[in-house]
Amino acid sequence: MNWQQHITSDKAILGGKPIIKGTRLAVEHIQGRLADGWSNDMLLESFPSLKPEHIQAVHAFVLECMVDGMLMWPLPGKAE
């Protein structure tokens, strides 16, 4: 999955947070709903502009962040 086809960042939109292209849906928001237990179907129903490939792109983006070391453990400033 080439997440770059679906995710972008623009400082004028949500302060530059990664978003789904053509929307104001932040990757963080989608990932948060998934972490809360939402299903893909719930996301797609709640956000009509969202497509299944966008959700897959969110997963690919987060994975790449982890592999590239952008997401590390322990988190800075957090006690182990």
Image (tube, rainbow, N blue to C red):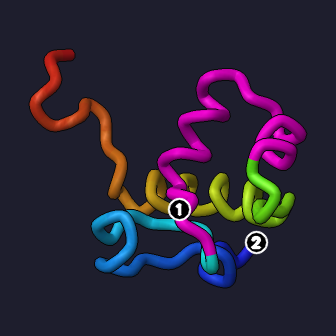
Q: Give the range drawn in magenta.
A: 23-46
Tell whether position 52 is magenta. no
For disc 2, the neighbor class at 10 Å (few under 14, some 14 to 19, many from 20) is few
Question: Residue at image x 51%, y 78%?
Answer: 8
Q: In which quarter of the image is residue 17?
A: bottom left
Q: Which amino acid does label 2 sit on?
A: Met
- Percent coordinates x, y for residue 65 in the rendering: 45, 59
- Please name whichever residue, 53 or 69, is drawn nearer the observer in this view of the structure: 53
Q: Residue 38 vs residue 31: left or right?
A: right
- Percent coordinates x, y for residue 7 in the rendering: 58, 73
Question: Residue at image x 10%, y 30%?
Answer: 77
- Furthest residue toward top: 80
The residue at which mark 1 appears reads as 64
Element at label 2: loop
The residue at which mark 2 appears reads as 1
Q: Which amino acid does label 1 sit on?
A: Glu
